[in-house]
Image (tube, rainbow, N blue to C red):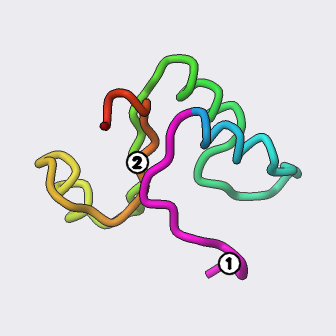
């Protein structure tokens, strides 16, 4: 766990991009997604799920069931 971190269950492309632009990246750091990935997700409007390594979670996503993780989406499509 990272001190000060908070769980974000869902976030729009735009809000995710804004959040990622505030991160100061340094060589050797490990992040789930970096600024380049954020730009690609936003540009091509790729709905993205961050679910970790639990295969049951992946199964739930694929079956459109409740899962533990984050979804990055285009606001109009999810509402």
Q: Which mark is residue 30?
A: none
Tell me what residue is drawn at x 81 percent, y 56 percent: 28
Residue segment shown in magenta: 1-13
Magenta region includes residue 7: yes
Q: Quadrant of the C terminus?
A: top left
Question: Taking 5 as reference, is 73 left or right?
Answer: left
Q: Is residue 37 above or below residue 31?
A: above
Location of residue 3 (image quadrant): bottom right
**Chain-order first, disc 1 or disc 2:** 1
Numbered circles on residues, count: 2
Q: Main secondary structure of the magenta part?
A: loop
Q: Is residue 21 above or below residue 10?
A: above
Q: Is residue 76 above or below residue 31?
A: above
Q: Which mark is residue 2?
A: 1
Characterize the local packing of mark 1: few (<14), some (14-19) or many (20 or more) Cα atoms within 10 angstroms: few
The residues bearing labels 1 and 2 have C-alpha atoms spaced at a distance of: 20 Å
Position in image of residue 41 (x %, y %): 53, 28
Q: Which mark is residue 71?
A: 2
Tell me what residue is drawn at x 15 percent, y 48 percent: 64
Q: Quadrant of the N terminus?
A: bottom right
The secondary structure type at the circle numbered 1 is loop
* Near-viewer residue (1 or 17): 17
Location of residue 68 (image quadrant): bottom left
Question: Taking 5 as reference, is 55 left or right?
Answer: left
């Amino acid at each position: 766990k990272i001190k000060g971190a908070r769980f974000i269950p869902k976030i729009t492309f735009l809000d995710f991009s804004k959040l990622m632009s505030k991160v100061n990246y340094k060589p050797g750091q490990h992040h789930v997604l970096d600024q380049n990935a954020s730009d690609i997700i936003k540009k091509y409007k790729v709905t993205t799920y961050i679910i970790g390594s639990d295969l049951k979670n992946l199964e739930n996503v694929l079956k459109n069931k409740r899962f533990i993780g984050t979804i990055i989406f285009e606001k109009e499509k999810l509402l």
